[in-house]
């Protein structure tokens, strides 16, 4: 049995509004809001790295949990934008913590990586000890800020989030998870040679089919309905996509936590940042089921169910 103990996040200082992006890609600020729901996003500074952002989110998470790096049994880092494939940012973060033997592994899956890591952490924590899950992305270095890259440049931002998964205590118990992959459709969303390529319409069509199916399967096998979760924490990809998932489940849209308007799509960081902000706004004991879901490159998608501890 494993628990969600604490979350954390880090947001770069630089705010990039739609006016700035629109001027570079040949669009209007109003069009960006209409197709995505995004109003601004954060961009990392030139000295920032995926590892440095992840480290700051991790430190914030450990502080919230009242733990130190020495307490960790494992580190999992999800990122689709790390500049080096192997070794990736996980070992850099472990080294920055002064850890010399703690296992630290990378999950190089854009957008869905943090959900995959949470599901794995729940299985691994009872054996290895507390698992620190980090999602860190600098997506602004994977886009082309010109009219040629308009469809992706308007979406992405840079941030990091973290979660401590512990087998001994926490505010929510990880009850179940579903993970799926459809490699036959992988070409519609990929990061290759440092650049993201996405067939936006195809991605949304796939996501609005696959996400509700996974969510309904997860709830059904745990004898729950879509009316039961007190909140849905979803990868912040596109506001129109979130609305369509809510409609498919027949769930009020306000049950889906949204911070996309302020941060854009931060790939594997987004789910953990949303969870951190939701938890900060709801610090009382969990009153009912909490559902996490994400969809991303691979194609990979899934869902995770957390229940009151």
Image: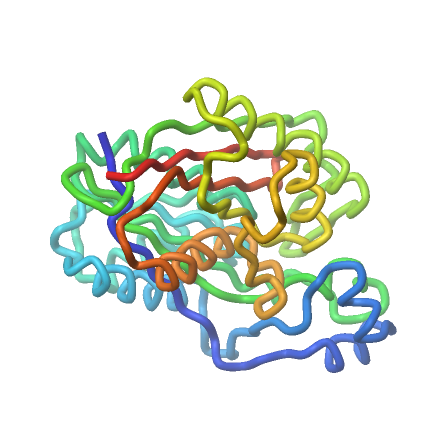
Name which residue lies at 33% across and 36% down. Answer: 307
Q: Return the residue nearer the eye: 4 or 254.
A: 254
Q: Report the colour scheme.
A: rainbow
Q: Return the residue nearer the eye: 164 or 191.
A: 164
Check the image and report above or below for 104 versus 182: below
> How many callouts does the rendering have?
0
Which of the image's four quarters has the C terminus? top left
Name which residue lies at 17% across and 61% down. Answer: 98
Residue 250: percent from left, percent from top: 65, 36
Name which residue lies at 48% across and 25% down. Answer: 218
Name which residue lies at 12% across and 51% down. Answer: 71
Residue 1: percent from left, percent from top: 22, 29
Q: Is residue 63 left or right of residue 93?
A: left
Q: Quadrant of residue 3?
A: top left
Q: Quadrant of residue 8?
A: bottom left
Check the image and report above or below for 270 versus 227: below
Residue 62: percent from left, percent from top: 22, 60
Check the image and report above or below for 96 versus 124: below
Q: Is residue 45 left or right of residue 242?
A: left
Residue 24: percent from left, percent from top: 79, 77
């Amino acid at each position: 049995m494993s628990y969600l103990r604490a979350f954390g996040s880090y947001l770069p200082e630089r705010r990039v509004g739609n006016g700035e992006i629109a001027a570079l890609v040949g669009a209007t600020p109003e069009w960006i809001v209409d197709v995505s729901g995004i109003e601004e996003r954060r961009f990392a500074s030139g000295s920032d790295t995926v590892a440095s952002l992840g480290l700051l989110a991790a430190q914030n998470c450990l502080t919230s949990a009242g733990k130190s790096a020495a307490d960790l049994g494992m580190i999992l880092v999800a990122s689709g934008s790390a500049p080096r494939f192997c070794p990736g940012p996980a070992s850099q973060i472990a080294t920055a913590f002064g850890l010399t033997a703690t296992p630290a592994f990378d999950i190089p899956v854009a957008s869905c990586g943090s959900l995959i890591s949470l599901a794995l952490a729940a299985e691994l924590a009872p054996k290895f000890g507390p698992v620190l899950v980090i999602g860190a992305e600098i997506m602004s270095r994977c886009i082309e800020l010109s009219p040629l890259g308009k469809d992706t440049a308007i979406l992405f931002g840079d941030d990091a989030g973290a979660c401590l998964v512990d087998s001994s205590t926490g505010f929510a118990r990880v009850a179940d998870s579903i993970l799926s992959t459809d490699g036959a459709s992988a070409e519609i969303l990929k990061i290759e040679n440092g650049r993201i390529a996405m067939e936006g319409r195809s991605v949304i069509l796939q996501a609005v089919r696959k996400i509700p199916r996974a969510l309904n399967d997860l709830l059904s096998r745990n004898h729950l309905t879509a009316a039961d979760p007190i909140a849905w924490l979803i990868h912040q990809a596109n506001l129109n996509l979130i609305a369509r998932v809510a409609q498919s489940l027949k769930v009020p849209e306000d049950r889906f936590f949204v911070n996309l308007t302020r941060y854009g799509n931060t790939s594997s960081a987004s789910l953990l940042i949303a969870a951190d902000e939701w938890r900060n706004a709801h610090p009382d004991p969990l009153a009912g089921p909490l559902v996490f879901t994400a969809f991303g490159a691979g194609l990979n998608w899934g869902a995770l169910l957390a229940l009151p501890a």
